[in-house]
Amino acid sequence: MVDQIPNLGRESEMLSEIGLKSMSDLFSNIPEGVRREDSLPLPPPQSEEQILEDARRLLGANVDLDSRPSFLSAGLARNFVPTMVPMLATRGEFLTSYTPYQPEVSQGMLQAMWEFQTMVSELVGLPISNVSMYDASTAAAEAITCAVRVKSKKATNPNSVFVSGLVPPHRLSVIRNYTQGVGIELHILPHNDDGSLDMEMVSSAAGSSAVYVEQPNSLGILDEGLIGLKEIIGDSTALIVGVDAVSLGLVQPPGHWGADIVVGEGQPFGIGPTGGGPIYGIFACTKEFLRLMPGRIVGQSIDTEGKTAYTLTLSTREQHIRRHRATSNICSNETLIALMGAMHMSLLGPEGLEKLATRISSATYAVMEAVTNIPGVDLVNPGGAFFREFAIRLPGPAKEALSSMDAAGVLGGFDLGNWWEDMSDCLLIGCDEGITESDISSLVDALGAWSGGVK
Amino acid sequence: MNTVFDFNGASGSGWSQPDSNFQNPDAVPDSLRRKRLPGWPRASEPELVRHYTLLSQKTFGIDTGFYPLGSCTMKHNPRVNERIVQLPGIDRIHPLQDSSQVQGLLAIYYEMQEMLAICSGMDAVTLQPVAGAQGEFTAIRCIQEYHRSRGDDHRDKVIVPDSAHGTNPASASMCGYQIIEIPSASDGRLDIDALRAAVGDDTAAMMITNPSTMGLFETNIAEASQIVHEAGGQMYYDGANFNAIIGKTDPGRMGFDAVHYNLHKTFSQPHGGGGPGSGPIGVKGHLSEFLPTPIASRRESQEGEPNGVGDGFYYFWQDVGDNSIGKVQQWNGNAGAVVRAWAFYRRYGRDLERMSEHAVLNSNYLRHKIMNPEPDVASKINCMPSEGSEASLVMHEFTLSMSPVKEINGVTGKDVAKRLLDYGYMSPTLYFPQIVPECLMIEPTETESKEVLDKFAADFHAVLSEDPEILTTAPHTTPVKRVDEVWAARNLILRHPGNDED
């Protein structure tokens, strides 16, 4: 018996008041030809106890990342989320509210989002932030369409956009889906053998509407050359940079070296990897893009008595007002996850952020040193600077290495052959603040045992 | 305490982290090194717990009170769902883990795909889109590739009724389509003649929700599908109002080719101040090869293979193939939202039909109560609203027009909405659909009791009986008085200015 409907058993009382006899009378407008006559072929309802038991059984069959040494990151972090964050963010008032269309009864969420905008703005070094995109990929994709809207009047090749060749294929696919319909032509920027962007080829991007690069890139490389990128492409081309948000505790924010739009995955602040979602994308920009940017924005205001208040603003960009001329179709976004992000960032504070980034950087280099000591295992991009991730070349297929390490109880990384066929002997190793000496020993033992046995 | 930035304690962060397990490599080249840390607050956990608790108390949710926000299906969110998503088997799962390590999650995905296909009369489902609008976008992309695959590239127009959600034209426009908006008939329903005049060999698709945003079932929907199909177009069902029809009819029977579902509406993923959502789509067989990749699949377990969830099947991510549109979200959708929706669905099972029945019952009951006050109450009301549609029956939501009230005493729909906040309610959806002047759109959902509906109707009448000035200056009891939205847009204070030391 369903336990979620307060008026079960009171149907006839309510029906008679509105002059109807049966529940089916309520659906008499559905013509016979389209009416469903049979019951849904689904199982009977369950109680809360039964559902929880099934959930534990099913989800318990999954291998969670904390149950073994894990080195899988690839753009998502096995982070530690302070306990306060889920506890406070799932307070019913936050959890069960919707988009704050009525600011007078939504001041709390509005203020929290305004604070979120400020913290993102500070983090990336740009003045404007919205209250979240779906993820890093849709943030990158909508940054590109936004940049084309703004820059196409000045650019000499207005429909051209240049994208780093190290943008992972799943993100490139999202970008293609979002850009194909509006006539944007994507060009791929090549990289040097050491994984840095080929700066000689970048000059061909001048005159286009936008350039999209990532720092660190998908192989974990912090590319010093990117600092000079804006100077090469000039003012008429937007520089869009995707970031690992946590890296900015150590690394200069792109807003300080000429980025017009910064996007990235917000997930490391606020929520566990959660099977890939819900997570949230960061989107920040300069004032030039403000009126044509996607997503919701909170502004400070006053009430009729002059008291400080917060409200959604610049809504005329949005689909519920502008319809097909809107700057984006985004409606439901990821506000609750952004709230978790704001809580996590507040708890960290500036020094806590630096410490977190340092812990990840330290773990990255400790793991790197250990695995590259294994005979036959080499760094793909030696000499570079790395954050969180790095790629190694193996003496055999990465797929086999992973499967062998899995049998030894180690989640050894990501098979780069899944992204690029010519890297099927490469493993992307992801490191986080939770990596221990013992995790590294397990990885080295498992990987060493496999590579030692490769002919 | 005004904002979180007023916390600026002397000694570092509020959350203690262990020291690094390893030596600091000092790996960041000087040219890339951050010079000044971000101007974030410096606060302790006790300070922040209080800060966010106070903010939550200035936020209205379903848990706080009745939330009749039409079109948003603000139903109760069962709490066990939140407990389930905290389990490590979902919270600590990476989307790139091998299928063998996520058998339980894949089994839940598979079950949800099957259930949604059954409820909607579709053949294939993907759970990848993460919001209703992204579901619309994804489905229109599939339709676009379908036409291209048949050499029908010239189809460049998408038809939407003028009562459609703004996301419909926005999503189709992002795919590169021109939008043809057709006016509604005088009863608020689809104007079939206007549709007939709008279709042609340039029609790619029609996007429509049924019941409509007017809360009306489109009785001639099968004919509409036929008209669009005969012109070579595809029919797209906006599932925003799916809560009204489960078990009673389905988009498949109505002739639709593609549909999106809002798991955050119909299946109770909490709305969280604006998100997250989840917007899976279902399609008929001829569109399935274009779906985003991958989808959850299964085969019988082979001998010697570990039997993951004990049902005799091995679950895996199935690549959709060369004609797939690829990815719309970077991973496999909002898995946490899917798991919550699964837990919600299990609560109902085949009784999802009861859910829709009670959503429609509550809507018709509340509409009747509002529009038919007792004589002693009616005598005190300054002026009654008119119904957005004269139809005798509505579905899960209904519209009221405050135009008569505005004409008599100058009180707008917005004034009524703001005054309802003083009575402890969230306002109905305001000024949508735009075809109803001074519109209030009300959706009570199935999780409100008769007493709540009775009280809301009585309070609504009380509002209409008050001195108009009380309404035009409302709200009076909220944490702030009416907020000046023009001031916000003019001054654009979009972040904290920063503390002095910065």
Image: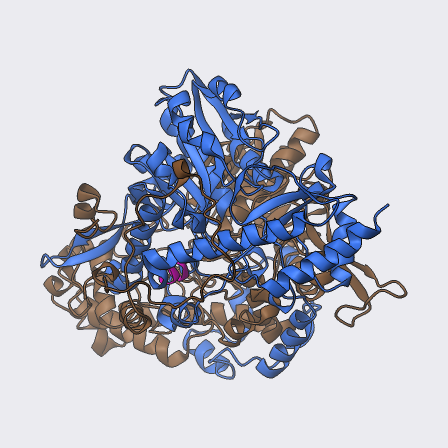
Chain colours: A blue, B brown
Q: Is residue B27 visible?
A: yes
Q: Nearer the viewer, residue B431 or A277?
A: A277
| Residue ID at (31%, 37%) | A290
Q: Which is the main secondary structure of the residues drawn in magenta?
A: helix
In the image, is residue B123 part of the stretch drawn in magenta? Answer: no
In the image, is residue A344 part of the stretch drawn in magenta? Answer: yes
Q: Is residue B114 visible?
A: no
Boundaries of the magenta span: A339-345
Quadrant of res B18: bottom left
Against B101, residue B285 (above or below) is above
In the image, residue A179 lies at what x, y percent? 52, 32
Locate residue A282 relative to residue B64 in the image: left or right.
right
Q: Nearer the viewer, residue B336 or B140?
A: B336
In the image, residue B241 lies at what x, y percent? 50, 57
Locate residue A280 relative to residue B139 in the image: left or right.
left
Q: Nearer the viewer, residue B377 or A240?
A: A240
Task: Check the picture and name the quadrant holding the N terminus of chain B.
Answer: bottom left
Quadrant of res A338: bottom left
Numbered-mark total: 0
Quadrant of res A424: top right
Against A378, residue B375 (above or below) is below
In the image, residue A379 lies at what x, y percent? 64, 41
Against A53, residue B493 (above or below) is above
Find the residue positioned furthest to the right.
B303
In the image, residue B13 lies at what x, y percent? 33, 63
Q: Nearer the viewer, residue B63 or A86?
A: A86
| Residue ID at (49%, 17%) | A204
| Residue ID at (36%, 19%) | A154
